[in-house]
Image: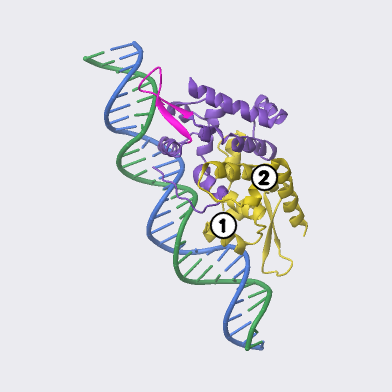
Chain colours: A purple, B yellow, C green, D blue
Amino acid sequence: MKELKQRSTCPVSTSLDVLGDKWTLLILRDMVFAGKSTYGQFLQSEEKIATNVLADRLAALELQGILTKAVAEDKKSKFTYRLTKKGAETIPIIVELVLWGTKHLATVASPMLLEEIQANKEAAIEKFQRNARENSQA
Amino acid sequence: MKELKQRSTCPVSTSLDVLGDKWTLLILRDMVFAGKSTYGQFLQSEEKIATNVLADRLAALELQGILTKAVAEDKKSKFTYRLTKKGAETIPIIVELVLWGTKHLATVASPMLLEEIQANKEAAIEKFQRNARENSQA
DNA sequence: TATTTCACTTGCTTTTTGCAAGTAATATAT
DNA sequence: ATATATTACTTGCAAAAAGCAAGTGAAATA
């Protein structure tokens, strides 16, 4: 596992201690924009995260209180990962990454998603957060 | 050096390919909030970046067009790093990291900075961007 | 009862990071 | 003019993290 090494008391630095690697925010992206919630779903993403890295990150995110892990309703051999409030509040960060990447890098964003964000960023963030919380009640 | 390996065409993923590590955004933080612009200044930060990692990241950021490197006015043995427009437009991401870290992690932010951001986020971001661009004219 | 699904773990190689020391081009002090 | 100090790196090596392929174990399905 991965224990948190806090390099300083700066909020940017400590946020990066938690979220600042190439995979953590992609897992959260999959939960927020693709509604994914299981280990197998996360493994299937286009970026092909290694299975041991995924296990490590999920455990770290759970430890940090960013997501919760629970036995799925349908099968008890399955787990469902859900965002906590703390986790859902990373959505503004992810949305800014979408906007920056779309503007400055060679990327392809879903036009509908992008339009929604550009039309009213605050409203779009609230909707994503509401969805994340709603799904967590299911 | 570090060439860009793009894992997918997703804007979140590609933004993380560029910015998603533990050091890159700290360098940008130092430029934005502390007005730092030289190699020696970056080395002195609280988080103690290794000198070879700093050199690697500065070269990668220059390659990505996020900052420019120029001989300093006062000494020609010194270089000045400045944010480009693309670089200054990462500020919203950094600001969201400040807010999330402040709310959810054990951190200490400058009260003045935090108040300024909380009072009017958009205005604060614009100010930081203006400063970054102003300094780049100096 | 056998096979498949699902969520991991293990072992090994490669890559990245961290650390300490070294170098080379100015700049400053004597 | 010469020696010392700055500044911005590079180099070499050990430690940590990531990537890859195969294996495991519990539960669901055939």
Is residue A67 highlighted in magenta?
yes
Q: In the picture provided, is C30 more to the left or to the right than A36? A: right
Q: Distance between the residues labelled 1 and 2?
A: 28 Å
Which of the chains bears the disc numbered 1? B
Which of the chains bears the disc numbered 2? B
The image quadrant of residue B43 is bottom right
Is residue B39 highlighted in magenta?
no
* For residue A89, above or below residue B127: above
Q: Residues within 10 Å of mark 2 (few under 14, many from 20)?
A: some
Of label 1 and label 2, which has the lower sequence position?
1
Give whichever of B62, B40 is nearer the camera.
Answer: B40
Circle 1 or circle 2, nearest the eye: 2
The numbered dot on residue B78 is none
First to last magenta residue range: A66-82
Give whichever of B21, A84 is nearer the camera.
Answer: A84
Q: In the picture provided, is B6 more to the left or to the right than B125? A: left
Please give the residue where the numbered disc 2 appears in the rendered image.
B117
Please give the residue where the numbered disc 1 appears in the rendered image.
B54
Q: Quadrant of the C terminus of chain B?
A: bottom right
Give whichever of B110, A50 is nearer the camera.
Answer: B110
Q: Position of residue B13 (x, y in %)?
A: 57, 37
Tally of marks:
2
Q: Position of residue A41 (x, y in %)?
A: 47, 26
Q: Do residues under tags 1 and 2 come within 8 Å of each other at their CB atoms?
A: no
- The residue located at (52%, 48%) in the rendering is A14
Q: Residues within 10 Å of mark 1 (few under 14, many from 20)?
A: some
Instruction: Give the residue type that dot 1 points to.
Output: Leu
Could you tell me which secondary element the residue under label 2 belongs to? helix
Instruction: Give the residue type that dot 2 points to.
Output: Ile
Q: In the picture provided, is B48 more to the left or to the right than B94? A: left
Could you tell me which secondary element the residue under label 1 belongs to? helix
* For residue A40, above or below residue A3: above
